[in-house]
Image (tube, rainbow, N blue to C red):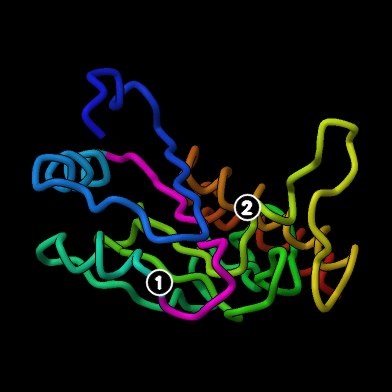
C-alpha cells in the first residue's frame, strides 16, 4: 500500500487463507484514496470459513465503509444482465457463501470480497495440473469460477459497461 506506483494500477488482488498483518493507518488512508479515486480491489478469502480477518482488519477501519452483500442487480453479480458472462453461481474452490460482498460508494463497488477462494479454483502447479479440487461441484464449479473472475476483472476495468440498454435484448434472448 505504500508503493509510490500504486495509483498507476487500476486493480489490486489480495488473497490469503490465514490472518494477515493489519494495515497501518497510513495504508488504510492510502487504500481509501485508491478506492475513492476509481481503483478496484478483489479480496479473495481462501480460508474456507465464513467471516475472516478481512472485515476486522480493513473494513472496520475504513471510516464510513461497511461490507454488504451485493444484490442480484449489481453489475458484479452473476445473475443479472450487466455481467459479461451469464454465470449460474458465485463459485470458487469451495462454496462458502452464495454471494459476493463489497464496499459500495455511490453506484460503484470498488472493493469486492469473495469467501469461496476464487484463486484456489484457478491455481495450477508447475506441470499445469489443477492444484486444488473444487468441492462440491467439480469442474463445472471451476468453470463458473473462471467466468466469475472474468466478470470481476471486466467490472474493475470498465465499471458498468453493460448498464447501457443496447446489450439487454441480446442477453435476454440468450437467457431464453
- Tag 1 residue: 52
Look at the image and say whether residue 46 sits in the magenta stretch: yes
Using residue 66 as the reference point, say whether residue 120 is left or right of it.
Answer: right
At 62% across and 61% down in the image, what residue appears? 117
Q: In the figure, 8 relative to 57: above or below? A: above
Q: Position of residue 71 (x, y in %)?
A: 47, 78
Using residue 64 as the reference point, say whether residue 176 is left or right of it.
Answer: right
Q: Position of residue 150 (x, y in %)?
A: 66, 47
Q: What range is drawn magenta here?
A: 38-51
Image quarter of residue 57: bottom left
Residue 42 vs residue 175, the one in the foreground: 42
Residue 88 vs residue 107, the one in the foreground: 88
Report the quarter where the N terminus lies.
top left
- Tag 2 residue: 151
Using residue 14 as the reference point, say whether residue 24 is left or right of it.
Answer: left
Q: Earlier in the sequence, mark 1 or mark 2?
A: 1
Q: In the figure, 74 relative to 26: above or below? A: below
Report the quarter where the C terminus lies.
bottom right
Look at the image and say whether residue 152 sits in the magenta stretch: no
Query: Closer to us: mark 1 or mark 2?
Result: 1
At 50% across and 54% down in the image, what residue appears? 16
Amino acid at each position: 500500500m505504500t508503493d509510490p506506483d500504486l495509483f498507476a494500477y487500476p486493480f489490486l488482488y489480495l488473497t490469503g487463507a490465514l490472518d494477515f498483518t493489519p494495515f497501518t493507518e497510513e495504508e488504510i488512508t492510502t487504500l481509501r484514496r485508491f478506492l475513492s479515486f476509481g481503483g478496484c480491489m478483489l479480496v479473495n478469502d481462501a480460508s474456507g470459513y465464513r467471516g475472516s480477518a478481512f472485515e476486522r482488519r480493513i473494513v472496520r477501519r475504513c471510516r464510513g465503509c461497511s461490507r454488504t452483500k451485493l444484490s442480484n442487480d449489481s453489475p458484479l453479480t452473476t445473475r443479472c444482465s450487466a455481467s459479461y458472462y451469464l454465470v449460474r453461481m458465485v463459485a470458487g474452490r469451495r462454496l462458502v457463501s452464495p454471494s459476493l460482498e463489497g464496499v459500495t460508494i455511490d453506484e460503484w463497488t470498488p472493493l469486492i470480497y469473495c469467501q469461496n477462494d476464487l484463486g484456489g479454483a484457478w491455481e495450477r502447479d508447475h506441470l499445469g495440473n489443477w492444484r486444488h479440487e473444487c468441492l462440491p461441484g467439480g469442474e463445472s464449479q471451476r468453470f463458473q469460477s473462471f467466468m466469475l473472475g472474468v466478470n470481476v476483472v471486466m467490472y474493475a476495468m470498465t465499471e458498468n459497461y453493460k448498464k447501457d440498454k443496447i446489450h439487454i435484448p441480446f442477453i435476454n434472448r440468450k437467457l431464453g
